[in-house]
Amino acid sequence: MRVRVWDARGRLTYAMIDFKEEAGALTFAVRVVPRASKSELAGEHGGALKVRVAAPPVEGAANEELTRFLSKQFGVAARDVEVLSGHASKTKRVRVRGAKASDLLSIVGNEKK
């Protein structure tokens, strides 16, 4: 999916985010940056949605914050967001039940710094 994103200098750019929509769920790659001052979307990184999380990568805290943050962004319950792979990695595969590709486009397309 090609989406509009804003870079660190506030300039409009285009990025590709790898995703798959099937069986009422959206699966996509996420690049996590832990220990941020606040949890926020940060554009795209290597085909993944880049998310800064305000939690350290210790004992699953960053994964829990990512799950909570994405559930809020997609408007679904936290139990509907699942980290499928990459639990101990910065690059993860995430499934959001009840989400569609248009939701991802809306979230990333409206993100502006």
Image (tube, rainbow, N blue to C red):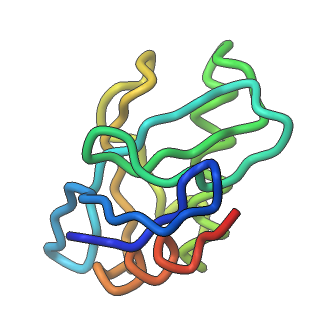
Residue at (35%, 26%) from the top-left corner? 86
- For this view, does 99 lie left or right of residue 25? right
Q: For this view, does 45 lie left or right of residue 54? A: left
102 up-or-down from 47: above or below: below
Whole-percent x, y for residue 88 in the image: 44, 16
Q: Residue at (74%, 47%) from the top-left corner?
A: 39
Q: Residue at x 37, y 29 (%)?
A: 91
Q: Quick check: 19 above or below 77?
A: above
Which residue lies at the image location 40% right of the left edge and 64% below the top edge?
Answer: 13
Q: Residue 32 versus residue 23: which sits nearer the camera?
A: 32
Task: Please provide percent x and percent y for residue 12.
Answer: 48, 69
Q: Quadrant of residue 63?
A: top right
In front of the other: 17 or 86: 17
User: Please, is residue 27 above or below residue 47 in the view?
Assistant: below
Q: Nearer the viewer, residue 89 or 76?
A: 89
Say which of 58 and 33 sits in front. Answer: 33
Left or right of residue 101: residue 62? right
Dividing the image into 4 quarters, which one contains the C terminus?
bottom right
Marker count (numbered): 0
Residue 81 sits above or below residue 66 on the image? below
Tell me where residue 6 sits by quadrant.
Answer: bottom right
Where is residue 44 shown, x and y percent of the image? 41, 50
**Where does the N terminus fall, quadrant-wise?**
bottom left
- Considering every residue shown, the one lying at the far right of the view is 37
